Amino acid sequence: MSFAGRVAIVGAGVGGLALGGFLSRLGVPFAVYEQARQFTRLGAGIQMSPNAVKVLRALGLERRIREFAFAPRSWSNRVWNSGDNLFDFTYGDEAEAKYGAPYLLMHRGDLHDALHSTVPAGSIAFNKTLTRAKRRRL
Ligand SMILES: Cc1cc2nc3c(=O)[nH]c(=O)nc-3n(C[C@H](O)[C@H](O)[C@H](O)COP(=O)(O)OP(=O)(O)OC[C@H]3O[C@@H](n4cnc5c(N)ncnc54)[C@H](O)[C@@H]3O)c2cc1C
């Protein structure tokens, strides 16, 4: 793909690739500019709340994400030195039915890989750092 797309996305992270995936679905030409020379498996665990999973669903990634994500049954918070219960959130089927999507935990690298699959090959220019932006009156 030529890098003369109408939309320039700076940063091929979680946000940039998600935007690229949607622009691609809409047929809007775009190019992503990433400062890194290549992708590396960065980060650790990341949680995707039901509203975020709905975004991934709209990108056609839900089935793929469910294959590697962990779906906890609940989230319990306790006081560190007494063990007293602070609060419990119930997840699992009950929460999925209530919110219309699951609450999922995954490695950021897996999420990033999945998002990368939504943009056409060659649409990311690596080793490109935005150093200055000019404000233009519309
Ligand atoms: C410790 C931690 C835990 C988190 N946990 C969660 C969580 O559980 N759930 C959740 O939803 N969110 C979580 N977040 C937030 C989430 O990571 C961010 O909201 C999300 O990654 C933001 O997406 P982004 O695309 O803006 O940034 P990133 O995913 O960080 O990507 C930014 C990209 O832009 C590139 N870049 C930066 N500057 C330039 C430049 N000048 N020119 C070119 N390229 C550039 C970078 O190299 C990078 O690839 C967490 C964040 C942190 C720090």
Image: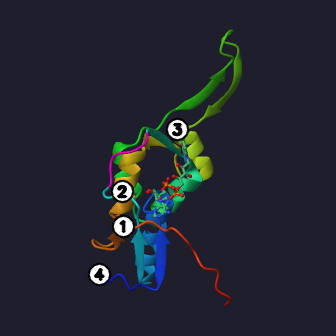
**Image quarter for residue 51?**
bottom right
Q: Which mark is residue 97?
A: none
Seen at 64% across and 85% down, the residue is: 136
Is the CB of mark 3 within 8 Å of ligand 1?
Answer: no
Q: Earlier in the sequence, mark 3 or mark 1?
A: 3
| Distance from the alpha carbon under mark 4 to that under mark 3 | 42 Å
Q: Determine whether label 2 and label 1 are within 8 Å by CB.
A: yes
Mark 2 vs mark 3: in front? 2
Mark 1 vs mark 4: in front? 4
| Distance from the alpha carbon under mark 2 to that under mark 1 | 7 Å
Residue 128: % across, % down: 39, 67
**Mark 1, other Cα within 10 Å: few <14 / some 14–19 / many ≥20:** many
- Name the dominant secondary structure of the magenta segment: loop
Describe residue 83's horizontal placement relative to residue 66 as left or right: right
Residue 114: % across, % down: 36, 56
Q: Secondary structure at mark 1?
A: loop
Q: Which mark is residue 92?
A: 3
Mark 3: which amino acid?
Answer: Gly
The span shown in magenta is: 39-43
Describe residue 47's horizontal placement relative to residue 37 as left or right: right
Mark 4 vs mark 3: in front? 4
**Image quarter for residue 30?**
bottom left
Mark 1: which amino acid?
Answer: Thr
